[in-house]
């Protein structure tokens, strides 16, 4: 019984992810589609697999070696991870000009991987509420 319930929930979760991705892609603007394409070109194979599955990917800070998860979005979407991969703190790092999520995420990736401490110096911290 428990195994059947687990299989049902797993299949339902998979279907929900597929439907969500389908509708999100359907309503994305052309500029957002171009931004996602560019972001994907900059991701490592591991990051790309993470992004395609979860709409987030992990980066390693160039100076501290800390791991961060960048989730799809434009603000309050960076999570510093503990040794188990759980969010322990959040960072809001946004550009001065409005950009689509793919461009913001690419800027955040580059900032954390090339000048982590300067990026965090201008970011606002927040307490993560998701797991």
Image: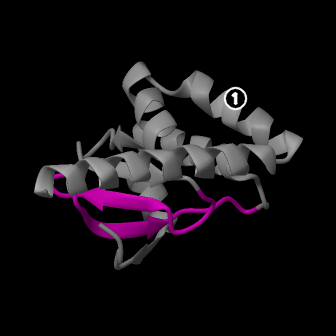
The residue lying toward the viewer, choosing from 27 and 94, is: 27
Q: Is residue 2 magenta?
A: no
Q: Helix, strand or loop at disc 1?
A: helix
Residue 48 point in image, percent of width and height: 47, 28
Residue at the image point whose x is 52% and y is 38% from the top = 110
Residue 2 point in image, percent of width and height: 12, 57
Question: Where is 43 relative to 131, above or below?
Answer: above
The residue lying toward the viewer, choosing from 80 and 72, is: 72
Q: Total number of numbered labels?
A: 1
Question: Where is 7 relative to 50, above or below?
Answer: below
* Magenta region: 73-96
Q: Residue furthest front?
A: 1
Q: Left of 112 or right of it: where is 88? A: left
The residue lying toward the viewer, choosing from 72 and 107, is: 72
* Residue placed under numbered mark 1 in the picture: 37
Q: Left of 112 or right of it: where is 3? A: left
Q: Is residue 92 magenta?
A: yes
Q: Left of 87 or right of it: where is 74? A: right
Residue at the image point whose x is 44% and y is 59% from the top = 78
Q: Left of 18 or right of it: where is 124? A: left
Q: Quadrant of the N terminus?
A: bottom left
Does any portion of residue 60 appear in the rendered image?
A: yes
Residue at the image point whose x is 30% and y is 69% from the top = 89
Residue at the image point whose x is 29% and y is 66% from the top = 131
Residue 75 point in image, percent of width and height: 59, 66
Question: Where is 2 relative to 48, above or below?
Answer: below
């Amino acid at each position: 019984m428990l195994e059947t319930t687990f299989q049902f929930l797993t299949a339902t979760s998979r279907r929900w992810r597929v439907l969500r991705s389908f509708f999100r892609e359907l309503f994305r603007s052309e500029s957002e589609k171009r931004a996602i394409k560019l972001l994907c070109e900059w991701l490592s194979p591991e990051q790309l697999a993470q992004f395609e599955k979860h709409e987030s990917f992990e980066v390693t800070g160039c100076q501290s070696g800390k791991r961060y998860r960048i989730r799809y979005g434009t603000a309050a979407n960076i999570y510093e991870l503990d040794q188990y991969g759980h969010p322990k703190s959040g960072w809001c790092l946004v550009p001065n000009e409005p950009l689509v999520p793919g461009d913001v995420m690419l800027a955040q990736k580059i900032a954390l991987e090339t000048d982590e401490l300067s990026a965090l110096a201008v970011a606002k911290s927040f307490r993560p509420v998701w797991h």
